[in-house]
């Protein structure tokens, strides 16, 4: 059996398992990143599945990622929460990293909202800002769509001229204003393999490439979501801003602490976004 056939079989097994157990299929999945997993505590859960109980799901090895799939209602809105994610630097391929999103897309979930913590590159950004993804740079050296294409899952050459849903970006900006959040920006997110953090030369190069923030996650999931014709909104908490001429040590604990400090504002923003998307506009 080829690797691709094995991947298809694993996805299909997972989809059957989830289809049999999920009490309902929400329109939205929210994937929570480093230091941002507590939004799940506001969900009225109908089902909590630890990742290690779901067939073929990867398991997170990062301590700040709890590792649960939660189905329930967030302020009355049906959602799936992915409490924690996987990274290529853990040893997973980008296909494995994006495994949960592929399975959920095949169950009929239509929208992906994902969060992460990232380092700022744009000197106009301030630590503690929330960046709405406008575009991205995939610098992983891998793509979850490599290999034989499954036509039922999406096209061989998916279009990425509009990678992030313009209506969701507009809603996110309006939601930030409604919540009184003045440190919400838009920008280009660059994804690197990690786990080593950027050198001054790499930081300078990333800036020159047009990146506003850099991290080590999210792009595999986004590529699969768009391949499956899901709507995508990405949000990064800017934990620090890198100056290549005055580089300071970047410490993981400080990144997590910075993400946790912004957590209340991010949670308010997410709740307002989904309220506007799914309550105010019942036609969606």
Image: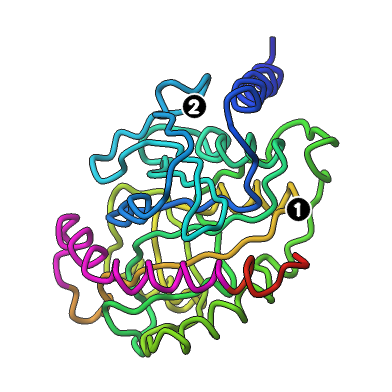
**Is 68 on the left or on the right of 278, as rendered?**
left
Identify the residue shown where x is 47% and y is 47%: 81
| Residue 273: % across, % down | 53, 72
In the image: residue 144, left or right of residue 83: right
Q: Earlier in the sequence, mark 2 or mark 1?
A: 2
State the image quarter where residue 61 is shown: top left
Magenta stretch, residue numbers: 248-275
Residue at x 55%, y 37% (from the top left corner): 100
Q: Is residue 163 magenta?
A: no
Q: Which mark is residue 114?
A: none
Locate the N terminus by quadrant. top right
Real-space CA distance between mark 2 and mark 1, rounded to the nearest whole angstrom: 22 Å
Residue placed most toward the observer, 283 or 168:
283
Tag 2 residue: 57
**260 in magenta:** yes
Q: Quadrant of residue 147?
A: top right
Does 271 sit above or below residue 9?
below
Q: Position of residue 170 (x, y in %)?
A: 62, 81
Q: Quadrant of residue 129?
A: bottom left
According to the image, label 1 marks what residue? 229
x and y percentages locating residue 216 in the rendered image: 40, 53
Q: From the image, which quarter does the C terminus lie in?
A: bottom right
Q: Residue visible at 54% across and 50% down?
A: 79
37 above or below 107? below
In the picture shown, does residue 251 fall above or below 119? above
Question: Tag 1's secondary structure?
Answer: loop
Q: Is residue 229 left or right of residue 13?
A: right
Secondary structure of the residue carrying tag 2 is loop
Q: Please name the predominant secondary structure of the magenta segment in the image.
A: helix
On the rendered structure, is 126 left or right of 18? left
């Amino acid at each position: 059996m080829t690797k691709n056939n094995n991947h298809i079989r694993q996805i299909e097994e997972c989809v059957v398992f989830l289809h049999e157990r999920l009490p309902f299929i929400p329109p939205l999945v929210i994937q929570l990143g480093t230091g941002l997993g507590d939004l799940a505590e506001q969900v009225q859960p109908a089902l909590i599945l630890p990742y290690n109980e779901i067939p073929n799901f990867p398991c997170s090895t990062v301590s700040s990622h709890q590792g649960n799939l939660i189905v329930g209602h967030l302020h009355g809105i049906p959602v799936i929460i992915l409490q924690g994610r996987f990274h290529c630097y853990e040893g997973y391929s980008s296909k494995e990293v994006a495994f949960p999103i592929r399975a959920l897309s095949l169950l009929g979930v239509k929208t992906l909202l994902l969060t992460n913590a990232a380092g700022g590159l744009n000197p106009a950004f301030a630590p503690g800002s929330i960046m709405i993804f406008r575009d991205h740079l995939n610098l992983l050296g891998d793509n979850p769509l490599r290999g034989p294409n499954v036509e039922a899952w999406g096209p061989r050459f998916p279009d990425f001229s509009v990678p992030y849903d313009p209506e969701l970006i507009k809603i996110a900006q309006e939601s930030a204003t409604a919540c009184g959040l003045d440190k919400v920006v838009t920008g280009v997110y660059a994804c690197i393999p990690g786990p080593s953090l950027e050198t001054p030369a790499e930081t300078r190069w990333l800036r020159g490439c047009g990146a506003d923030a850099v991290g080590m996650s999210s792009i595999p999931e986004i590529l699969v979501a768009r391949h499956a014709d899901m709507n995508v909104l990405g949000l990064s908490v800017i934990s620090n801003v890198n100056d290549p001429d005055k580089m300071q040590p970047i410490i993981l604990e400080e990144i997590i602490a910075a993400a946790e400090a912004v957590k209340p504002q991010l949670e308010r923003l997410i709740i307002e976004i989904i309220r506007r998307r799914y309550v105010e506009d019942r036609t969606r």
